[in-house]
Amino acid sequence: MKKFFSFLILAFVTSAIALAQNNSEHMTFKGVPIDGTLNEFVDKMKQARFTYIGTHDGIAVLQGDFAGHKGCTIGVYTLKSSNKVNTIAVMFPPQKDWSSLESTYVSLKSMLTEKYGEPSECVEMFHGALQPDRDFEKFHKLKYKECTWDTTFRTPKGDIQLSIWSQQSDCFVLIKYFDKINTDAVKAQAMDDL
């Protein structure tokens, strides 16, 4: 009987360790593995004090504070074929001038570098022959998509992409977290289709 209980305890501990290792293989966002169904992940984000706004075209939208910035919008993306969460996008509040956007970008880039090491890729440039000197010229280039400000950090668990972005009339800093396991699953499925 004593051996039976010892076996049960060993089996339980082994299962718990295996489960913990499986969860830790996924990239995390706010300490939560980027995995599971959309509803499961949204519930965990609500527990992390994000406010659920709604779901549109399979993308859950939440709002809350992130990395010291208030009023961020979080998009939770799933693999359409399996309803598994694979990407989290954080849109920082829109800014009305280049210097504010660049300041936010540089600050976040510094923190990400401290946490994940030097970036794998970094492109920070204005396109065209005329290079802007003044803040409003740089902002104009951004609004008309005449610049690229992207930094990518590759980790064993996935990629983090930091950008300065323009969409319609809004300009903002954006961070995307891509979970490697779930993103690779979609790629494998697509490769099977070929």
Image (spheres, rainbow, N blue to C red):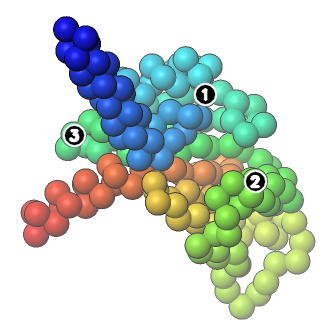
Q: Residue at x 27, y 36 (%)?
A: 83
Q: Amino acid at mark 2?
A: Met
- Total marks in image: 3
Q: Give the mark nearest the N terminus, 2 or 1.
A: 1
Q: Residue at x 68, y 50 (%)?
A: 172
The image quadrant that residue 94 belongs to is top right
Q: Give the mark nearest the N terminus, 3 or 2.
A: 3
Q: Which residue is mark 2?
A: 111
Q: Which mark is residue 142?
A: none
Picture coordinates of residue 56, whole percent (x, y): 39, 32
Q: Amino acid at mark 1?
A: Gln
Picture coordinates of residue 26, whole percent (x, y): 42, 45
Residue 62 visible (yes or no): yes
Q: CA distance from mark 1 to mark 3?
A: 25 Å
Q: CA distance from mark 2 to mark 1?
A: 21 Å
Q: Marks 3 and 2: which is nearer the front?
A: 2
Q: Which residue is mark 3?
A: 82
The image quadrant that residue 133 belongs to is bottom right
Q: Nearer the viewer, residue 73 or 47?
A: 47
Picture coordinates of residue 3, whole percent (x, y): 22, 17
Q: Give the mark nearest the N terminus, 1 or 3.
A: 1
Q: Which residue is mark 1?
A: 63
